[in-house]
Structure formats: C-alpha cells, structure tokens
Image (spheres, rainbow, N blue to C red):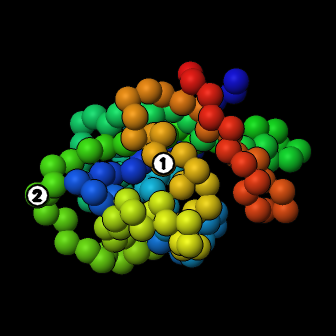
C-alpha cells in the first residue's frame, strides 16, 4: 500500500473527546478529530504531533498509533489517513470552545459521538470509534456511494 497523505488524532479525556468542527473541506461543518497533511519528510507520528500543536496548542511527545482509515477516491485510487489517539488525564484543563483558523474545538462526550441520531459528526467515525478504543491496530476501509457512507470494513493490521 502506498504512503497515506493525512493523519487524524482523537484526544480522549475521560469520557470526552476533543473534536474540531471544520470550516474547510473535507467534512466542512462536521465534528472530527484534529490532524492534517503529511509533509514530504515527516513520519506520520511527527506529522500528527505537529498538527495537534498547530490546531490545539497542546504539546505531546507521543501518541498511540491505532491504524489507518482508507477510502476509494475514484480515479485517485485508495486514499487515507493514519489514525492516532492520545489519552490525557480526566482533570487535564483545556477550556473550550476555542475558535481556531481550522474551526471550533470542543469536548464531546463519547455517548454523543456514538449516538445513531447524531448527524453532526463525520459519518464514518461512529463506525470505527469503539473498535479504535481497543488495544489492537486496525485498518478501517470506508465505502462511499454518492458521498454517502455505505459501510466500513474493519481488518486487523
């Protein structure tokens, strides 16, 4: 598989996750993790640590690799992102909401993220989020038709 272009991280604090309501494509207007595009010389881990700092101001030396999320991007072939999680103490003080150049940061309860009635979250996240919380590393391949998520195929890496 070719090197993926993007990274995403979910910062977990107790039963909450720091999410970004994006002001730009992709997933504009939806709550999603923080992350971004890899620079040519970066490893995925270096990229996500940089992106977390740029988007939240938080500085971490390490994050937990959780696998990858991929999708078929038509003529471009398979695209995707490296998936990370950072668990921080429940008492970690990070007041929100915060307006950034990327959008609005806010803590969201895991139950809110997973609610089947929730249309505000990026549609693929509830399909893999619970599995991502496990200690195993997975590849989550998202199948879309006409920009609507049809299914997520989960495989061990």
Against 59, is 95 above or below? below
Q: Would residue 156 appear left or right of 153 to someone viewing this image? A: left
* Among the 4 quarters of the image, the one containing residue 136: top left
C-alpha gap between disc 2 and disc 1? 22 Å
Q: What residue sits 39% from the left and 63% below the top? A: 111
Q: Would residue 139 appear left or right of 35 to someone viewing this image? A: right
Q: Secondary structure at mark 1?
A: helix
Which comes before the other along the chain, label 2 or label 1?
Answer: 2
Viewer-proximal residue among 69 and 112:
112
Q: What residue sits 46% from the left and 46% below the top? A: 130
Q: Position of residue 57 (x, y in %)?
A: 26, 59
Against 150, is 69 above or below? above
Q: Would residue 60 appear left or right of 54 to someone viewing this image? A: left
Q: Residues within 10 Å of mark 2 (few under 14, many from 20)?
A: few
Q: Quadrant of the N terminus?
A: top right
Q: What residue sits 43% from the left and 56% below the top? A: 34
Q: Position of residue 29 (x, y in %)?
A: 57, 75
Q: Quadrant of the C terminus?
A: top right
Q: Position of residue 70 (x, y in %)?
A: 66, 40
Q: Is residue 124 visible?
A: yes
Viewer-proximal residue among 61 and 71:
71
Q: Residues within 10 Å of mark 1 (few under 14, many from 20)?
A: some
Viewer-proximal residue among 94 and 42:
94
User: Which marked residue is nearer to the observer: mark 2 or mark 1?
Assistant: 1
Against 112, is 49 above or below? above
Q: Secondary structure at mark 2?
A: loop
Residue at which label 1 appears: 129
Q: Is residue 22 visible?
A: no
Residue at which label 2 appears: 91
């Amino acid at each position: 598989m070719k090197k993926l272009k993007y990274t995403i991280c979910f910062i977990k604090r107790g039963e909450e996750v720091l999410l970004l309501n994006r002001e730009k494509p992709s997933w504009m207007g939806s709550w999603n993790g923080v992350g971004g595009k890899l620079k040519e010389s970066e490893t995925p881990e270096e990229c996500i640590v940089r992106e977390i700092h740029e988007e939240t101001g938080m500085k971490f030396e390490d994050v937990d690799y959780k696998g990858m999320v991929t999708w078929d991007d038509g003529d471009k072939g398979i695209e995707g992102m490296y998936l990370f999680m950072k668990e921080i103490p429940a008492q970690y003080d990070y007041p929100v909401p915060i307006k950034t150049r990327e959008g609005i940061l806010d803590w969201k309860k895991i139950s809110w993220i997973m609610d089947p009635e929730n249309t505000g979250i990026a549609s693929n996240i509830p399909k893999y989020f619970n599995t991502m919380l496990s200690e195993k590393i997975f590849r989550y391949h998202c199948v879309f038709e006409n920009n609507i998520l049809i299914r997520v195929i989960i495989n061990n890496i």
